[in-house]
Image (cartoon, rainbow, N blue to C red):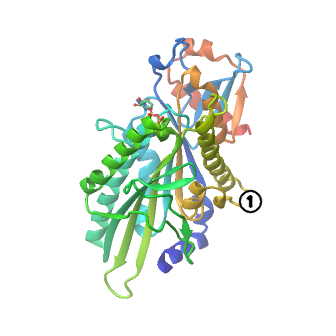
Amino acid sequence: YLNCRMAQRVATSDGAAKKTSRVRVAVRLRPYMGGEDEKDEGPCVRGLDSQNLEIVNWRNATETVKYHFDVFHDEKTTQQEVFLSSVKPILPHILTGQNASVFAYGPTGAGKTHTMMGSSDQPGVIPRAVREVFKLVKVKADEEGWDYSIGMSYLEIYNEKVLDLLSPSSQDLPIRENKDKNIFIPGLTHTTISCFSDFDKQFVPASLNRTTASTKLNQRSSRSHAILLIKVVRTQRAAPHRKQTGKLYLIDLAGSEDNRRTGNQGIRLKESGAINLSLFTLNKVVDSLNSSAAVRVPYRDSKLTRLLQDSLGGSSHSVMITNIAPEYKYYFDTFGALNFASKSKLVVNKPFTCETVAVPAMPVKRARDDHTAGGSGT
Ligand code: ADP
Ligand code: MG
């Protein structure tokens, strides 16, 4: 722990902390699905280039609203490309005692689970990241004098309760902080894994449990945060036997849709309130980390942000992948997700529908020319 803290101080003193504490924001647009669009209205969102997209302005159909992000992944982006650009670069840090987190944010149905878990044909961020961590450790262990050990935990935050997905009978677990400011959950199952199939054997059934429970309990999977923790501990073989711990959180967040609008009642309404608390607090935390002003970061206001306190901001490396869907029925949820993800938007005076006809799906060249316009609005 001591060495972990020392590593963080080094990062701070060379000025890197300011830069790395920002949460990188990527947006991924999933493909248009005809079956999701009863009125067959076509998409209401489209990409402009690798950082900008636009959405129809519902207040005035002759305008679009243009948003700028660190990265924009269009509907043709593969799982491999998302992993390479948004996740792979942060993984080496967890081998040197630093922390990292990757979130999938966005409305239910927009592709969070596809992005994080994927399918056997198209594996997502989680299986790719775990394979990569094993690969990095293998290379490092061969060339340096450290012993590495990799472990996993898998939990869910549901109604502000912390539940162990590797020990489904367990009750709400507490979140604690030790004297070195490391966050931990006493009683949470932590299993050592020595290869990818070790991981898969734990992760797949635990994920299935969660999905099965979800159909019984009002799509629980869209109302809870699923949090996978991969922990890398390394110990120096020679004296002074330094020990460093790096944590990687891979998170499939609850749906960001506003449940008040969809008319949820009773237990659902209560769930929405709790979800809103954790997501609402995450919004505030990400906002304060990404703002240039020195503001208090309200980690303690929800379970999710409390858990992530040592892995979001500070010297940790974080990326939020905001998933959006192009159909009109998602319009307001998409608008909400984009407004959260970007503080930079610009109303552009040109009709969306006319352009859909006149311009090819991805007008990369043209859009790149007026790219600067995307960052200028606030
Ligand atoms: P969420 O977890 O946000 O509710 P899902 O990941 O379950 O959304 O995605 C909803 C549906 O859209 C699923 O059938 C999924 O396979 C499909 N989907 C999502 N993103 C993509 C994508 N990039 N390419 C192809 N299909 C996708
Ligand atoms: Mg999902």
Residue under numbered circle 1? 295
Can residue 323 be seen in this snapshot?
yes
> Where's residue 114, x and y in %?
41, 37
Query: Position of 116 compared to 70: left or right?
Result: left
The quarter of the picture where the C terminus appears is top right
Image quarter where ligand 1 lies: top left
Residue nearest the observer in this picture, 132 or 49: 132
* Quarter holding residue 139: bottom left
Residue appearing at x 45%, y 63% in the figure = 247
Callout 1, which amino acid? Val
Can residue 44 be seen in this snapshot?
no
104 w.r.t. 361: above or below = below
Query: Position of 197 compared to 43: left or right?
Result: left
248 w.r.t. 222: above or below = below
> Where's residue 161, x and y in %?
54, 54
Q: Residues within 10 Å of mark 1 (few under 14, many from 20)?
A: few
Q: Is mark 1 within 8 Å of ligand 1?
A: no
31 w.r.t. 103: above or below = above
Q: Secondary structure at mark 1?
A: loop
Residue appearing at x 45%, y 17% in the figure = 35
Residue nearest the observer in this picture, 222 or 268: 268
> Where's residue 170, x and y in %?
43, 58
Query: Position of 144 compared to 60: left or right?
Result: left
Residue nearest the observer in this picture, 225 or 100: 225
Residue appearing at x 58%, y 56% in the figure = 303
> Where's residue 365, x and y in %?
53, 27
